[in-house]
Amino acid sequence: MPLEMGMYERRADYKSEKQCQRSSLAFYQAVRDLLPVWLLEDVRATEAFHWEYDGRACAFSPSEALLYALVHDHQQYARHLLQRFSVHALDMPSASFLCCAHSASPHMSVAVRYNRKTILKLMMDTLKDFADEDEKKLLLNHRGCAHAEGGKTALHLACDLARPECVLLLLGHGACPYVTDRAGDTPLDCLLQQISQSDMDMRTKRVCLGYLVLFMPALRFRMRTELRENAALWSRLVGDQAFQWLSGQCPTSLFVQCMRKVTRSVPNEQLETLPDFLRPPDFRLHQF
Ligand SMILES: [Zn+2]
């Protein structure tokens, strides 16, 4: 039987599932062992394939390679992929890298989960290459699927895990603090639940709270009624001043209001050039 035209065109067609598993494991290990960027890109272009559910062997896309770089904190490789492929390195990976058809592009959530601050910063810097502001917002605020991620955004996850640097990076680059997850919770609700569930890392959680307050001109969130009904408890958990702001008893301090103006009027990339006393990382909200 004659072979169809095009069958010789894709080397990947000749790979079996087993061969693919071997070559994708080898690529995974090469990234894990932090091999040089040129070598990884050479392997990615010629040897490494992964098996897709529909029975195809596929080469690794830049976005799939970036996921491996994130998992293993290979910062140089991540930098290379983002510089060379820009926002395409954040494209949706193929189905075998995802939970289901409703999954969000996973790079930001993976960066938050593994606390890869440096690579998350590189990814956020790349977002400026989006020609379309809406596309950027969509990526930043995309909610995960119901099964694996509870419909959460990367910002929800950063609050759940109390990762202040991630919270600030995401908010500073335009992540929306009002997006709700499947349970109807904003990232602030998630953080408050973490605060009420355990005393662990309370200082870190309060820094996260400070950043959220800074980027939420209107403190709109589901748990406000719960705060008001249990005033004594919440006042102890978050401090008197923050309790009054969150429960709506009094407006935020002049300092917070000034800082909101500063963060809005200074471009993201310049936030780091502000004098120390004005920089959000030195924001003193956590010293309630
Ligand atoms: Zn799913």
Image (spheres, rainbow, N blue to C red):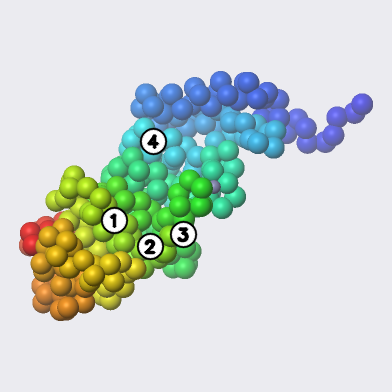
4 or 1: tag closer to the N-terminus: 4
Q: Amino acid at mark 4?
A: Val
In front here: 132 or 244?
244
Mark drawn on residue 185: 2
Find the distance from the CA under tag 1 to the CA under tag 2: 10 Å
**Residue 284 visible in this rendered orientation of the protein:** no
- Residue 93: quadrant of the picture: top right
Q: Which residue is mark 3?
A: 182
Whether residues under marks 3 and 1 lie with C-beta atoms below 8 angstroms apart, the answer is no
Q: Nearer the viewer, residue 223 or 96?
A: 223
Q: Residues within 10 Å of mark 4 (few under 14, many from 20)?
A: some
Q: Residue 274 location in percent, x, y?
A: 14, 63
* Residue at 17%, 48% in the rendered image: 199
**Mark 4 secondary-structure assignment:** helix
Residue type, mark 1 in image: Gln
| Left or right: 151, with 5 as reference point | left
Marks 3 and 1 sit apart, C-alpha to C-alpha, by 15 Å
Identify the image quadrant of the C terminus.
Answer: bottom left
What residue is drawn where x is 44% and y is 40%? 66
4 or 3: tag closer to the N-terminus = 4
Residue 4 in percent (x, y) is at: 85, 34
Q: CA distance from mark 4 to mark 3?
A: 26 Å
Q: Is residue 22 visible?
A: yes
**How many angstroms separate mark 4 from mark 2 (CA)?**
28 Å
Which residue does the numbered mark 4 point to in the structure image?
Answer: 71
